[in-house]
Amino acid sequence: MNLESILKYSQAYNFWQWAARRHPPEQGRIFLSQRRVYILPTRHGLTFGAALVLMLVGSINYNLALGYVLTFLLAGMAIVSILHTFRNLVHLTIVAGKVQPVFAGDFAHFILHVENARAEARRSVDFQCDGQAVTTAVPGNGSVAVDVPLRAARRGWLELPRVTVDTRFPLGLFRAWSYVQPAMRALVYPKPDSSLLPEPRPRPDTGDSINLGIGSDDFSGLRNYQPTDSPRHVAWKAVARGNALLTKTFSARASRELLFDWSDLPPDMGEEARLSRLARWVVLAHQSGMSYGLRIPGNDVPVATGPAHLNACLQALALYGAAPDHGAPSR
């Protein structure tokens, strides 16, 4: 029997084989069964064990009865803590929640719902992902929502990587942990630049109207009467006071519609810079309450308003140039 065949029956070997293998995201509810939870001594636990060995050697050397009592009392406490640390993590259920779209450079907040079907509360449970750690406590027969932050470096889809769930409760001598990777992803919009909103200009193909001309909405002043003016607009009260014929003027509130076109940007501007500029304009137009549309290669978003239209434009910018998506739906 060679070494390879012997290692196949080793639990440590099987664990490292599993850990090194790339696992796809998990759909649905993730249950932390006993086979998924691992436990090992921490650095403090190893130091504590070494101290117990020294105490035992000293008790044997000097025949200290109380030394034996203290040594075995502490050893028994450490052994019992193994069970409590393991039980603090095992049989938890993790369910993927929602994640809102963000701009590149911000933190995406992935919401995980942790459910505890046991009557005992689970304390000091850590969720670690990409250098960020969140600590929570799960009440007995209850659930809690955990916000796992993840920095969005670039636009497009951001999938939640593997999350390490661990605990060192109650004494910190042992660490129990498990790996989960719920099927979650966040949509990352291009980071807007600092440009100003361009001046609107009429486009024959959109039929927009941007100039504030003479209309009949709001009173704006008086001017000299002209023969072509309507009698309804004559300022008869001024005429009654002995003034010359004057005509009331009104300002029309014309609809301001903007179309942000990829081809209108400078030709030497890079692709990502163009997307950042268009994202900035879309956000400013939405904040100003204007009607706007978007035209980029391969995608046209008609002129409209509202939060849904804003999300549609930003999503088109975020997924520009991306391959057709056949993955898990966004949450």
Image (cartoon, rainbow, N blue to C red):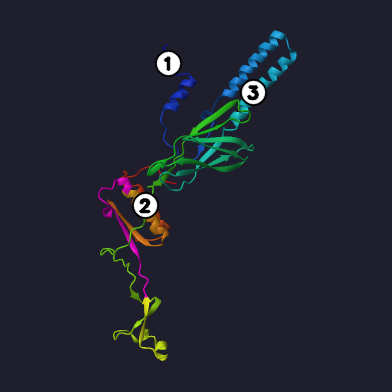
- Residue at the image position 41 percent from the left and 91 percent from the top: 240
Q: Residues within 10 Å of mark 2 (few under 14, many from 20)?
A: many
Count of labels shown? Answer: 3
- Residue that mark 1 sits on: 5
> Is residue 236 left or right of 78 when viewed as pictured?
left
Q: Amino acid at mark 1?
A: Ser
- Residue at the image position 39 percent from the left and 61 percent from the top: 305
Name the residue at the top extreme: 61
Secondary structure at badge 2 equals helix
Q: CA distance from mark 1 to mark 2?
A: 58 Å
Q: Of the numbered discs in the image, which one, if any, rests on residue 256?
A: none
Residue placed most toward the observer, 299 or 222? 222
Looking at the image, can residue 233 be seen?
yes
- Residue at the image position 63 percent from the left and 37 percent from the top: 121
Q: Amino acid at mark 2?
A: Ala
- Residue that mark 3 sits on: 78
N-terminal label among 3 and 2 = 3
Secondary structure at badge 1 equals helix
**Foreground label between 1 and 3:** 3
- Magenta stretch: give its range: 251-273
Q: Vertical placement of 141 versus 67: above or below? A: below
Q: Residues within 10 Å of mark 3 (few under 14, many from 20)?
A: some
Q: Amino acid at mark 3?
A: Ala
| Residue 202 is inside the magenta segment | no
Q: Quadrant of residue 170?
A: top right
Secondary structure at badge 3 equals helix
Name the residue at the front extreme: 243
Q: Residues within 10 Å of mark 1 (few under 14, many from 20)?
A: few
Q: Of the numbered discs in the image, which one, if any, rests on residue 279?
A: 2
Q: CA distance from mark 3 to mark 2?
A: 57 Å
Residue placed most toward the observer, 269 or 181? 269
Residue placed most toward the observer, 107 or 328? 107
